[in-house]
Image (cartoon, coloured by chain):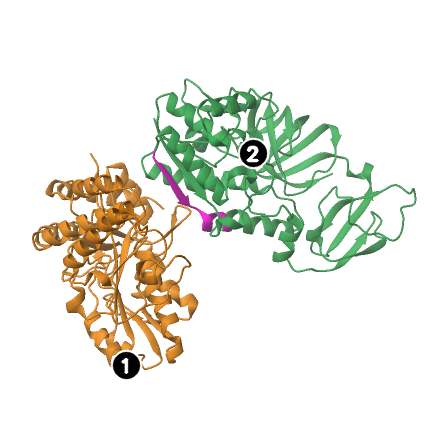
Chain colours: A orange, B green
Amino acid sequence: MSVYLDHAASSPMRPEAVEAFVEASAVVGNPASLHRSGQRARSVLEEAREGLAEALGAQPSEVIFTSGGSEADSIAVLGGLAARESEGRHRMLVSAIEHPAVIGAVGHGAELLAVTRDGVVDATAAAGMIDATVAVVSVMAVNNETGVLQPVEEIRRLAARSGAWMHSDAVQALGHVPVDFGASHLDLMSLSAHKIGGPVGIGALLAGRAITPAAIGLGGGQERGVRSGTAAVALAASFACATRLAVQELEAEALRLGELRDRVAAAAVAAGARLNSRVDGAPHIVNATFGGIRADALLFLLDQRGVHASVGSACRAGVHQPSEVLLAMGRTVDEAGQSLRFSLGHTTTDLDITRLESVLPLAVEQARAVR
Amino acid sequence: MRVLAAMSGGVDSAVAAARLVAQGHDVTGVHLALSKNPASYRTGARGCCSLEDSHDARRVADKLDIPFYVWDFAEEFHEAVVEDFVAEYRAGRTPNPCLRCNEKIKFAAVLDRGIALGFDAVATGHYADLRRHDDGSVTLHRAADGAKDQSYVLGMLDQTQLSHCLFPLFDVEKPVVRAEARALGFGVAKKPDSHDICFIADGDTQGFLQRYIDDAPGDIVDADGTVLGRHRGTHRYTVGQRKGLDLRVPSPSGDPRYVLSIEPVSHTVVVGPRDDLAVRRLTGIRPTWTGSPVEGAFRGRAQYRAHGAAQEATIEARDGGLLVSLDEPASGVAPGQTVVVYAGDKVLGSAVIASAA
């Protein structure tokens, strides 16, 4: 039996979400078509939109379905910049620990907001960078590698004062910390279905009604003209179903996973690790540096014992690269290469963590011998 | 046995892994990432370094339903193989990087990591025959498929390394390997063999070396020391080379001239007639032995390149060196190449050729 501790990469689909997907797959027609079939398909899509909006404190018209979190992020930063350049706003500010879909904007001129050694975006430093030339500021709600919560509201106030749009990637927040788009006063927010037990291949960009980011892809102008392409009706229905469940269960799950997370953190510390996560972080992620140990060796030894953890960072041709997030937090390349992420989710059980507690010390011991 | 199958992405290592699975071993596939930038390495070349090779290896592991990992040995490979390759050329020698990779990476760094991770053996798709004996020792022999035999590139492994090796293709011929791959539905069944250096993406060794080694002009001379021309750098030449000498003075006999030797310190390239390429005595340094070290003189066979026949020779091991006296003269032997010595089909050991005369 394997212990799956990589929910931040992808969480198993909830049976209800599978059912919703299968049911909606039977629907005939393109939701943009004008006949009765199209109308029925459109109806399923709109129900999904409404369900999602309700669960997230948003208006249905604020929900723009995308292919996933990465596309939502890309539209927010690049589409945000493109929409506002004519106002003389030609700058993008993104935190140094964003997902590649946001931080990739550096290649388009984005400037980085620094983070502290704790992995928190430095709001004071950000204050000095935000002015009327900034089109969009992007700071994630929960870091995907460390689970550290970010001062989104504090930076949003700074952005609002200068008239910059504020975007937050809330992919790792959904289902783990409360997400209320309306109450957040954010301009833009990114979400993904498969991190909460929904299907891979769909996400959403929530965009306030007052604003319209520019489209970054060509097409027929679906989804408010922001994201073209035939809407994925069944994926949307399944996404809405998973979101509804994740939000319903949030309070109890946060408590339950928080306790399990504390046990994972304690086990890592007992095995000699230093934590890169914080006790007040999201309840589902523990990132730890095991000094003197190759993360890939430890990952392998855990895998051999049926425990599926992660190095957290991006992978090129099967080889993991040093985590940019940990490097941005001031860790050395060596330290980054000695770090693992354990992430929990809706299928994680007490027994899973007991299993981890029993195999981790042995695996760490053995990994010490690996050069 | 818990076996780590090194999977290059080629057909040989794929079938080797499949055979181990069929024999009931607990097999884990591992592909070695040898470049920080996989796209820069030659596609399919020796099947060890490119992005496609990693993918091909993964798909074979999927078909075999065995765990598969990519291990990053890019830094170790660069230091031990690529930098050594350049340094050898800079010193006027002709190295074989594949031997170096086997010696320092596959059967050293990878083997060490595998053992630390709890594996009993490392398996590869090399065509060589490893025989285990009652006293616990192992001996290395030529493979059944003489045309594919790769015992030469394994000739510098020692007893400890060999005792942790498995070469499942010891008894098959290449067409059989391809047939097995086809039968198992491996996409790599038709993948061509390759004989190029994996870290030289375009196959242009000269171009590669010129990026690393600065030109240092010098004279091209004949055996008497008469200057016949100039060259831009000794790394642009290898022993036995005929083309690219660009000599304005024809040889007295009118016959073509060949590079006879390279003297990197004085930046001199010595050329002469083909006959002068012939050598009978090879002096080897840093000898290695597959079993207990051999002392004294004995009759055997010597092979000094991967794709060449072994030649009858008298071999003398003394003072930490190896003296090989070939019965028949050989040509195109360059310092830096490895000579592997055999007793019949059994590999005894190896040495790096320091000089040939």
Name the image quarter holding the C terminus of chain B. Answer: top right
Q: Amino acid at mark 2?
A: Val
Percent x, y for residue A86? 40, 77
Above or below for A205 versus B136: below
Answer with the quarter of the image where residue A224 lies: bottom left
The residues bearing labels 2 and 1 have C-alpha atoms spaced at a distance of 68 Å
Bounds of the magenta segment: B67-78
The residue positioned 69% from the left and 60% from the top of the image is: B215
Percent x, y for residue B51? 48, 45
Residue receiving disc 2: B153
Q: Chain of mark 1?
A: A
The residue positioned 10% from the left and 52% from the top of the image is: A248
Would you say residue B68 sits in the magenta stretch?
yes
Viewer-proximal residue among B351 and A282: A282
Above or below for B132 versus B152: above
Percent x, y for residue A245? 13, 49
Residue receiving disc 1: A162
| Mark 2 vs 1: CB contact within 8 A | no
The residue positioned 61% from the left and 43% from the top of the image is: B95
Name the element at disc 1.
helix
Name the image quarter holding the N terminus of chain B. Answer: top left
Above or below for B345 versus A307: above
Q: Chain of mark 2?
A: B
Percent x, y for residue A106? 40, 67
Viewer-proximal residue among B159 and A4: A4
User: How crowded is the residue under tag 1: few (<14 C-alpha within 10 Å), some, or many (20+)?
Assistant: some
Q: Amino acid at mark 1?
A: Ser
Answer with the quarter of the image where residue B151 lies: top right
Closer mark to the observer between disc 2 and disc 1:
1
Res A114 seen here: no
